[in-house]
Image (tube, rainbow, N blue to C red):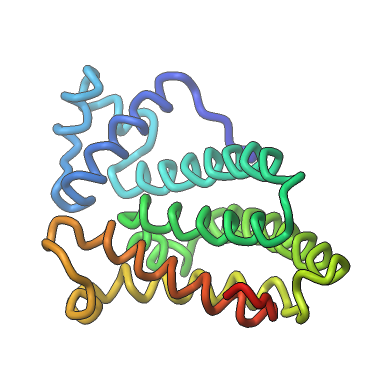
Amino acid sequence: MKKKFTEKQIHILDVAEKLIAKKGFEGTSIRDISSHANINVAMISYYFGSKEKMMSYLYRYRVMKTRESFAEFAEVIKDGKPEMQMKELVKYVVNQLFKFNYFHGFVTQELRHTEHLKDDLLEFYTTFTSKLDDVIKKGVASGVFHHAPKPEDILTLILGSSLFVIRNKNFYELYVAGKEENYLRDAEQKVLANLLVTVFSVLGYNAY
């Protein structure tokens, strides 16, 4: 990532992300962020320009951290069997989407006119797709997978299913058991279970 963050910026972004995760973007004020970060309100404008622009910086920071964690994650699972790696890859993306669900509405708006956000997402998607492709090829070569779907189609399936559920709570909560405050947790588990069945069926893996 070309954009470098100072320690002060990272501190502010970390505080802002925790507050936004709890209260939402609209429910989190600049005063809330500055108070919890122990800084003057004017520092937000100095470092980011506005609350909306700060969200753009926060998103880029989160993508950067996700890329770093994915690189470490991919290294950890690289020697595992193809079916194990595939399962963990699906779980990783689903977990990230649900964990940072408060970004999705913002990203939808910003992508229309912010080129660097598109570039950041593109880099992560291509990295993840390349890993998927590697696992699929190893699975086919070893006879574990009987089909070789396109990795970009697998990623599209994962993203589409997860984002639909996150953005359509009023519909999907009709099919998720449990209390409302546990919706995202329970919905994530349901989506993951269904995706694993679907992905492994597409791969021709007989255990699913």
The quadrant the N terminus occupies is top right
Above or below residue 174? Residue 84 is above
Q: Nearer the viewer, residue 53 or 17?
A: 17
In screen coordinates, is 87 left or right of 54? right
How many circles with numbers are drawn on the protein? 0
Q: Quadrant of the C terminus?
A: bottom right
Residue 144 higher or lower than 203, as above or below: above
Of 131 and 178, nearer the camera is 178
Residue drawn at 88 percent across, 68 percent down: 141
Q: Position of residue 23 (x, y in %)?
A: 16, 47
Image coordinates of residue 174 in percent, x first then y, are 17, 80
**On the picture, is 201 further left or further right than 100?**
right
Q: Position of residue 27 (x, y in %)?
A: 14, 49
Can you tell which quarter of the image residue 145 is in? bottom right
Q: Position of residue 91 (x, y in %)?
A: 50, 57
Query: At x 69% / y 80%, what residue is drawn?
Result: 204
| Residue situated furthest front in the rendering | 207
Q: Which residue lies at the image location 70% right of the left edge and 55% below the top edge?
A: 127
User: Residue 184's quadrant in the figure?
Assistant: bottom left
Image-quadrant location for residue 201? bottom right
Q: Residue at x 15, y 33 (%)?
A: 32
Q: Is residue 188 above or below residue 206?
A: above
